Image (cartoon, coloured by chain):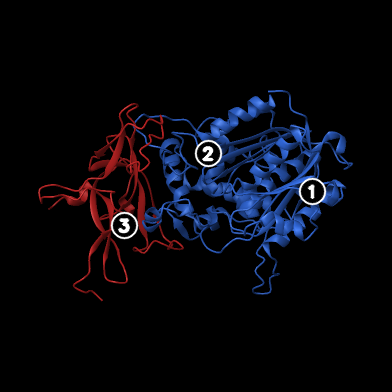
Chain colours: A red, B blue
Amino acid sequence: MMTSAAKKVPVKEGLWSVPSSPHEKPQLIGSRCLLCGEVFFPKKASGVCTHCQSRNLEEIKLSTRGKIYSFTVVMQRPPEYYKGPVPYAEGFVELPEGVRVETLFTDCNFDDLKVGMDVELVIEKLYEDEEGNEILAFKFRPLTSRKGE
Amino acid sequence: MRPLREVAIAGAGLTRFDTYDGEKGRVFKEGYELGMEAILNALQDAGMEWKDVQAAFCGTVYQNTGSGHQAIDQIGMTGIPIVNVENACSSGASSFRLAYQSIATELYDVVLAFGYEKMPRGFIRSTAWPLWQRAMGFNVQPANYAKGAVRYMEETGATEEDFARVTVKNRKNGALNPFARFQTEVTMEEVLSSRMIAKPMRLLHCCPLADGGAAIILCSKEKLRSKGKVITVAASILNSGVYGSETGGTGSTYGGGSVRIHDDLVELSAKQAWEMSGYGPEDMGVVEAYDTMAPGELWDIEKLGFCKKGEAPKLLREGALNINGRLPVNTDGGLLSRGHPLGATAGAQIIEIYRQLRGEAGARQVPEDPKIGLAHSMGAGPNSSITILKR
């Protein structure tokens, strides 16, 4: 049952930025290596570049738009941990920075998903836990689905 | 490095890969009993006594602490070192490589490499993902292969029919293998109408769950007792992750991506295997490729160097990959027929090559009398392992 104490809780802290004003959009947070230029998502908690092993990483906010690199629609509930709806679509989105982000897809007809499709980041409910808290996750949705807004 | 001593296969043994849960009239067996059974079969095949074995390596993934000890305790503890190896689906191959190394470097003369698994039901569970990624549903194995399959279709023009054809071929081979989980053929229509698991992967594109054990005894040539043809190890390779490689055909790049590194883990293993053995793809008379999901066999034989990228579906359509084709692949039915008891799988692949080179593969014997063969296993981690045997 929903109570007044219900909160919105990210599936993990630090995956995306929380805007301080309504004009800003949330962005995924990654790392860039200042030595070799490699970009990572999520941010490297170790502080080590796993490409060149330098310790010179800076935190960066990643582009909110990218293209679908690959995808699938999972028809069967995974054995544990996942509590969102089934079937669900997930896959990789390639961002302009070159990094491929594994993500859920939302706001789309599963049959319309295609490699190369333009998509944008949204932060959405993944599921509701026993205390009525909304567990939030990052997802991508096709840009075409915004037509008519 | 000084030259390595030649290492031979003394003998090998399997259990039937099946469901040993005691339900619906099925036999119940503990996992360690499957390991024990495989060891006893290998000893018999080798014509050796248990006391001949000087060390043991055991590959398992989901079993208890000391899995090798539990199996060997059923036969008798003799003070030999027993080392348990967990390297995901490459656990058995990793055990084999450790056994190979300890004989090649003259530490021991007779060593046991075995593996077994009693599988939990349902999707193969992988805990190799962080908790938040599991919460987002990213840890589903068929889905990972599905994403790889979508990329493969995009880049090569392969079709769902091509993937179904892999299942049909391997199930046909498996019908000739008395140790396989599935010993029945399936049609294209049955594969293409089976339940969708993770688009475009259907149930019959997935290897079945199975429990089982596989054991191989390796030795120096002078310790051989078996009267069969002498089979030696031409290459034993293990590579774990390499930066920039796609992980297990998932479509995801291991690492970041902006520097555009495109090293491939399987191509690296193949390169090292050809270098170590002195052979090339054209020398292989029989191959065990990694078909945990049907499309995997196609990109595996391409990455191993048997043909160019995108050409495997054509070889399959032409019948080149059949038992009587010019490149027989997964003659025992592969994972798709044999099933996938994680710790036993790679051992079973190596054993199939061994049987084929000895001319002991029965109804599924390759008619061309193969003299050299290759087994490739993958695993989460990631891991990639290649074994080349020769006669």
On screen, residue A33 versus residue B370, left or right, reads left
Q: Nearer the viewer, mark 1 or mark 3?
A: 3
* Chain containing the residue with disc 3: A
| In the image, residue B170 above or below residue B123 | above
**CA distance for labels 2 and 1:** 28 Å
> Percent position (x, y) of residue A42?
33, 44
Q: Amino acid at mark 3?
A: Val
Q: Amino acid at mark 2?
A: Trp
Q: Nearer the viewer, residue A74 or A114?
A: A74
Q: Tell if the residue under mark 2 belongs to the same chain as the one under mark 1.
A: yes
Identify the image quadrant of the C terminus of chain B.
top right
Which residue matches tag 1?
B362
Element at label 1? helix
Which residue matches tag 3?
A11
Residue B299, labelled with which disc? 2
On screen, residue A4 versus residue B344, left or right, reads left
